[in-house]
Amino acid sequence: MHTFSVWAPSASSVELVLRDGVLPMHSGADGWWSRDVVEAHHGTDYAFALDGGEPLPDPRSPWQPDGVHGFSRVFDLGRFRWTDGEWTGRDVRGAVFYELHIGTFTPEGTLAATTDHLDYLVLLGVEVVSLMPVAAFPGRHGWGYDGVDLYAVHEPYGGPEALQAFVNRCHEVGLAVCLDVVYNHLGPSGNYLGSFGPYFTDRHTTPWGPAVNLDDTGSTEVRRFICDNALRWFRSFHIDALRLDAVHALLDESPTHLLAQLSLETALLAEELGRPLGLVAESDLNDPAMVEPVAEGGLGMTAQWNDDFHHALHTLLTGESAGYYGDFASAGVFAKVLTQVFLHDGAYSTFRGKDWGRPVDPLTHRGGQFLAYTSDHDQIGNRALGDRPALTPGQYAIGAALVITSPYTPMLFMGEEWGASTPWRYFTDHDEPALAEAVRTGRRQEFAAFGWDASEIPDPQDPATWRSSVLNWSEVDESPHRELLAWYRDLLALRARTPELLADNLDSVTVTEGPGWLVVHRTNLRIAVNLANTPTEVP
């Protein structure tokens, strides 16, 4: 027997639609409807019809084998036989992250194919595999940030059981798993939540339209929808940490912010499960309150991405100073972000047009609470051509050294460790002609405004755009890729065995600079960097 349930507070009637018939559902408390079906089991297809309308997927659908517009399917979370019983978890602060996209990490683009490379990641020195979103999204190929079935796993990646098997194998080889989740918006195609209830509100607006309803009428169940989703990944898929996309777009004026609620509930589950569970925020706010305890007025995140570090390092290595990089081109900026986390810590931000951020107190905050990186999916994919940083092997080596020997939690983006030649572009796979053309035109217009020839911008809908972004694994055995990969491995091994590099106290880091060089001081260690094109003498 299986119990079907759905929250539809405004519906006068709700019907459970099965492949072989339709059954009325029973109204319960707080807008919930339910129906027990003796014959239903793992693999049963179903949908919900509201007030006699068309069948719609379950908002909490665990499995969408026929895509985001098709029927949902019952998935028994307890069927999988876990063999990771000896896994005791990992505190992700200070651990080595490796961000990857399932659809382009291998030619097959599946979780099973990615599993074949886990030994490679272990040998590299990775400790946390950070998966970009796997929630079901339209079409076959996409970044995953337009997901619409947040409880399901994208079927072309292998579906929910493939994710369980992937996490299980990661734990067997000693890797933690961080999963990217998107709670600030849903994609434009297959988003049926608004038909079921007040999942969105006009009280706030975001770049994607009306905000997710976190503080308006009906928000209690919407917040439950999000928190239950997060806890489910931890409990039923053994995920170790969640990366929360663009939390600054979670607009919430209620007494307890959604992130604080999620932090408290995650802590309780961690205690129950007996292993650490992490919440890693992507935040544009530059506010250390993000990683401060809820009991002290913070939002309780375990860690957060630090784009200021990326921007400062990118500018240091490339000399690029257009757009938001302009603020980071001044002398001393990299030294500041390496020791004080943020450049904009109350200072004026040119590209925002206002004072921004708050300072980080090095005596009360740890470097491990902030992620540092030379690149990530956004900083590559949101460029016009999706091009990786135009660095020489020596510059790649410098970037790696400054990230890996920093007091921060280091993160690599897939392929950077060998200087992958493949770009990582913006690609989509929408079936609706009007939406496909809107995405295509919008992308070209966006960059035409910056002086790009529209014909040069890759078409997101062209399968060739996705195909060009797939890693070319044959490069790892070629020079100079082979030598750079060895450098990354050596650096990560050095970090793992050196207490001074594992220490994350910010007040122990200092930087001295001169013309074309800088030296980072980590207690009794020195990281000397030559930024010039010729030999340089460092005092």
Image (cartoon, rainbow, N blue to C red):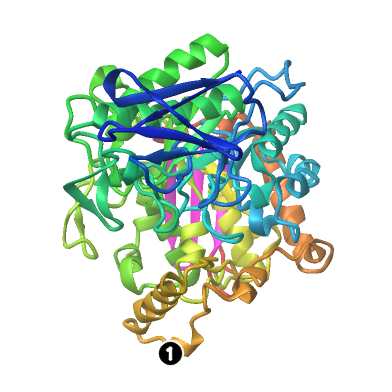
In the picture shown, does residue 485 fall above or below 71?
A: below
In the image, the segment drawn in magenta is 507-530
Any part of residue 293 in sight:
yes
Secondary element under disc 1, as helix, strand or loop, is: loop
Of the pair 487 and 70, the residue shown nearer to us: 70
Q: Position of residue 278 (x, y in %)?
A: 49, 28
In the picture shown, does residue 535 fall above or below 23?
A: below
- Horizontal side, residue 96 vs residue 300: left or right: right
- Horizontal side, residue 375 vs residue 163: left or right: left
Of the pair 168 and 209, the residue shown nearer to us: 209
In the picture shown, does residue 431 fall above or below 269?
A: below
Outermost residue toward the right in this view? 477
Q: Position of residue 69 (x, y in %)?
A: 51, 52
Q: Which residue is mark 1?
A: 453
Of the pair 522 and 15, the residue shown nearer to us: 15
Outermost residue toward the front in this view? 21
Q: Position of residue 93 (x, y in %)?
A: 51, 31
Of the pair 69 and 512, the residue shown nearer to us: 69
Which residue appears at 47% of the width and 59% of the height? 378
Q: Amino acid at mark 1?
A: Asp
